[in-house]
Image (cartoon, helix red, strand yellow):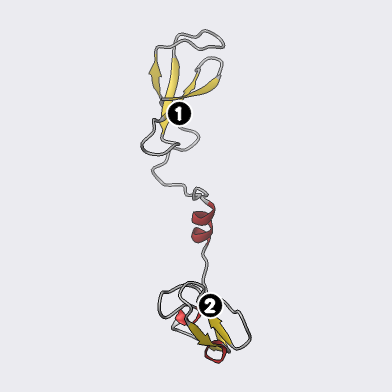
Amino acid sequence: MSFCHARDFLFCSMCGTLLSFDSLHFASCPLCGFKRAAGDIEGRETRYTITAEDIRRELKIEPFVILESAPVDDEAVQRAVVNEECPQCRHPQLEYYTKQLRSADEGQTVFYECPQCRHKFSINT
């Protein structure tokens, strides 16, 4: 098989739609009706390179990257404190941080944690 550097042999020359193999003699475009002879396609191959980053992006998985500037587990991360009562142990202050989990035109999510009993909860704002 010969490798085809011009990978457009599987696509319609008129509109760019992927060709459909309706018979043994030709491939046709389901959108505009363009036809390409099967002999023009026969013996060609297309190669694709897929990286781990491509898979993570497609599956919407966060990349596992540890930056040198990221805090190490041994270091205590200092969070902001708000004067609100813990619903579980009634401690007068809660630590909190925010994240944008929903779309940009919606509010952020506030995550609270009690420094005394470690009760965690979140509120969408």
Q: Is disc 2 surrounded by few (<14), some (14 to 19) or many (20+) residues within 10 Å?
A: few
Q: Nearer the viewer, residue 106 or 66?
A: 106
Location of residue 56 in the rendering, given as x and y in whole percent from the top left corner: 52, 55
Q: Residue at 54%, 87% (x, y): give it.
A: 41
State whether residue 114 appears in this view.
yes
> Marks 2 and 1, Cα distance to the nearest angstrom?
49 Å
Q: Position of residue 42 (x, y in %)?
A: 58, 89
Could you say whether the residue bearing mark 2 is in a helix, strand or loop?
loop
The residue closer to the viewer here, 46 or 16, is: 16
Q: Residue at x 53, y 77 (%)?
A: 47
What is the residue that sits farthest to the left in this orientation? 105
**Residue under the point 50% across and 17% down:** 114
Percent of width and height locating residue 55: 53, 59
Q: Does 85 appear above or below 4?
A: above
At 44% from the left edge and 12% from the top edge, which residue is drawn?
A: 93
Q: Are marks 2 and 1 in contact (CB under 8 Å)?
A: no
Marking on residue 76: 1
For residue 47, the mark is 2
The amino acid on which the numbered mark 2 sits, given as a three-letter code, is Arg
Of 62 and 114, nearer the camera is: 62
Can I make out residue 7 in this image?
no
Is the residue 99 above or below the residue 82 in the image? below
Quadrant the N terminus occupies: bottom right
Determine whether the residue tagged by mark 1 lies in a helix, strand or loop: loop
What's under tag 1, amino acid-wise? Ala
